[in-house]
Image (cartoon, helix red, strand yellow):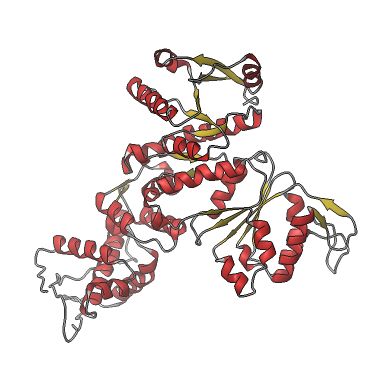
Amino acid sequence: MSSLHTAQQVLWLDPVQPLDAPEHAQLTDAGLAIRCINTLDELQSALSHGQTMALVIRHDTNLDLLKSCQTLMLRAGVSVPMVCRVDRRNLELAVQAMRQGAAHVLATDDWSTGSWQMAHQAIQALRLSSSAASMVARMAPPSEVVAAATPQKSVVYVDPVSRHLLALAQRVAQANVTALIEGPTGAGKEILARVLHESSKRARGPFVGLNCAALPEQLIDDMLFGHEKGAFTGAQKEFKGLFEQAQGGTLFLDEIGEMPLHLQAKLLRVLQERLLTRLGSERQVALDVRVIAATNKDLRVAIAERQFREDLYFRISTFKLRVPPLRERRGDILPLVASLLLRHAPNAQEFTLSDEAQAQLLAYPWPGNVRELENVVQRAVVLCSDQHIEAHHLMFDDAADMQLHMAQELVNTPVASTAPTLTAPATPVASFNMPTEALRYPDTSATEDNAVIASNLQEAVKSSEHQMILAAIQTTESRMEAAAKLGISPRTLRYKLAKLKAENGSMSWAA
């Protein structure tokens, strides 16, 4: 905070002991203007003058004080971000503070300027994303909403599982230990690695990443450890590897389970000795780098199959963090959608979601995790013409290819007065009558209004989905089998069938 031109006005409340003179001086050096508060009445009169509130929590009963402060702010119509100070040995208390709405948590014995700067940066990022927070509030209950952010990238942790993970990561960040992040592809392992970096004392240093599965092994060796000029044919100048580039910061090794065995041995030696020798050099370089590794593999299985070194596993897994798949933290889905809509909306337009669209997003199993969610959001933005996203604007990855194929078939088929005839199974479980009017596509050679084209595109997607569901129902013997054939959950299929029935009054059902 010392980098700011004006001191930050901080309301300081410690229910146990007052702030002494040396501590007050340290906070002043950190760029803070402290106003000590002793009672809730004093807090109420000071709220309009505070930019941040610092609350010291020493035991569980102080959490009631946290709630009282939040209630007071709510009644006064004032929102002052709260930084809670908690004993670094009491992890559970820190987790509870984050769950109850603390914007940041600091250790009670941490008076460093850097830590307060990180707290300020997190709060500033939250303020800058206030429009995202307002959209999130419309999509999730207010008591469920907590957003944390780093200066580099917005991070949404709303689900209780995610909030616990965030609090644990911020705790681990304070210790200079290697960390292993486990989780499925697309779940956000690199995002968590950045949280570890930005929440640590190395935040001012570089964050350097390498995907071990994206490069051939010869190139990984050179990328990591570097080389001297003339070390091999084509080495026209010296090259500092990623370890040296990350000096004073963090090196993130993604998909470390894909690293070749002989490079694992070299990496282990560098991590143990904290020394590096470039290819073609005899000089050793001392390293000051924190290593964070990530994997979507079970490294224990890889060790048993002799694909990963056990000694390297224990070296990189001083502390393990697991990022759950999106289906295990459904409280994050709608807030993530809000954040992604802000990122991908053209001309900063504000989008809304219908109740049916929200229900589909929450019911879907998300095999591709956050990465798949972003794809679905981008498609919805393209298909939606009025900034209001309906259920038929959602195209999920596991059905997208089939929907596109169906739409192409409809385009290439001459327009007829009836829909294509589908052969029913010998013993159908359910049957229904669909409207027979075929979808007419616009003549692309003619000059037409873009809104008309967009509307027809939406209808094409919707029609192809209906045809797929009809075909699956008539060619399988149970709804569970039909859902598996469509690549969706039985719950999602029930929802879609109910919607089809509601939209088509002529539809009849037979068990």
Estimate the x, y position of residue 260 in percent, counting from the top left: 69, 70
Q: Nearer the viewer, residue 33 or 12?
A: 12
Tell me if 482 is positioned left or right of 104 in this view: left
Tell me if 108 is positioned left or right of 315 in this view: left
Residue 75 visible in image: yes
Residue at x 60%, y 29% (from the top left corner): 116
Q: Nearer the viewer, residue 403 or 10?
A: 10
Estimate the x, y position of residue 418 in percent, counting from the top left: 16, 76
Q: Is residue 468 above or below residue 84?
A: below
Q: Is residue 62 above or below residue 450?
A: above
Residue 471 falls in image quadrant: bottom left
Q: Please state, as top left, top right, bottom left or bottom right, where the N terminus lies in the image.
A: top right
Q: Nearer the viewer, residue 378 or 85?
A: 85
Estimate the x, y position of residue 270 in percent, counting from the top left: 77, 58
Tell me if 56 is positioned left or right of 173 in this view: left
Residue 252 falls in image quadrant: bottom right
Residue at x 48%, y 33% (from the top left corner): 103
